[in-house]
Image (spheres, rainbow, N blue to C red):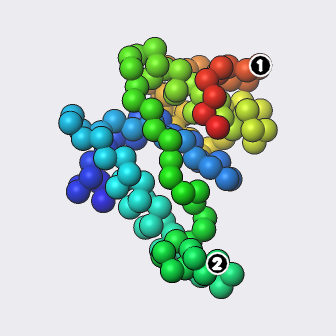
Amino acid sequence: MRTQRPFTADAMVVLPDHLHCLWTLPPGDADFSTRWRLIKSRFACGLPRVGDEPKRRVEKGERGIWQRGFREHAIRDESDFAAHADAIHFNPVKHGHASRAADWPHSSFGRFVARGVYSADWGASGSVASLELD
């Protein structure tokens, strides 16, 4: 998929009931919709059918594990990028899944620590991000 619809996943977190991503798309390409559709459909195709999907979803080829749609936000500058990356990485702490960002393995937090953006104990105390993602 990424060869046909390239993007860079700059930051991401996967939680039990939702996920957040910060992507860079090629210049002049703002087609988030196709990328999300492909990601969602390829993931869902790998799951077994449970038989209790609503008829309307079955008719549309949906599996019911993803919410319909998504929210997008065009990053304005480095400060906006940093605020969104902070909010993404703090999300597991915010939702009570971890006591600090480093304790949640399903995110890009470790890459940011390796690059020196965060210290390993970042997000361990108090609310780090004021930006609301969800």
Image quadrant where residue 3 sits: bottom left
Please report the residue visible at 65 percent of the width from the left and 20 percent of the height from the top: 130
- Residue 121 seen by the camera: no
Above or below, 133 relative to 62? above
Q: Residue 38 vs residue 13: left or right?
A: left
Image quadrant where residue 96 sits: top right
- Name the residue type under label 1: Gly
Please report the residue visible at 60 percent of the width from the left and 28 percent of the height from the top: 87
Secondary structure category for the residue under label 2: loop
Q: Residue 28 vs residue 58: left or right?
A: left
Above or below, 109 relative to 60? above
Question: Exactly how many numbered labels are in the figure?
Answer: 2
Q: Residue 53 vs residue 71: left or right?
A: right
- In depth, the one of 62 and 102 nearer the eye is 62
Give the residue number, with chain letter if any, for mark 1: 126
Residue found at the very far front of the displayed protein: 56
- In depth, the one of 119 and 2 nearer the eye is 2
Q: Position of residue 128 (x, y in %)?
A: 67, 19
Secondary structure category for the residue under label 1: loop
| Residue 117: mark | none
Q: Tags 1 and 2 in contact by the CB under 8 Å rule?
A: no
- Name the residue type under label 2: Glu
| Residue 53: mark | 2
Whichever of labels 1 and 2 marks the residue nearer the N terminus, that label is: 2
- Residue 52 seen by the camera: yes
Q: Position of residue 85 (x, y in %)?
A: 52, 27
Image quadrant where residue 81 sits: top left
Please report the residue visible at 64 percent of the width from the left and 21 percent of the height from the top: 129
Q: CA distance from mark 1 to mark 2?
A: 40 Å
Q: Residues within 10 Å of mark 2 (few under 14, many from 20)?
A: few
Q: Position of residue 26 (x, y in %)?
A: 24, 38
Classify the position of the N terminus by image quarter: bottom left
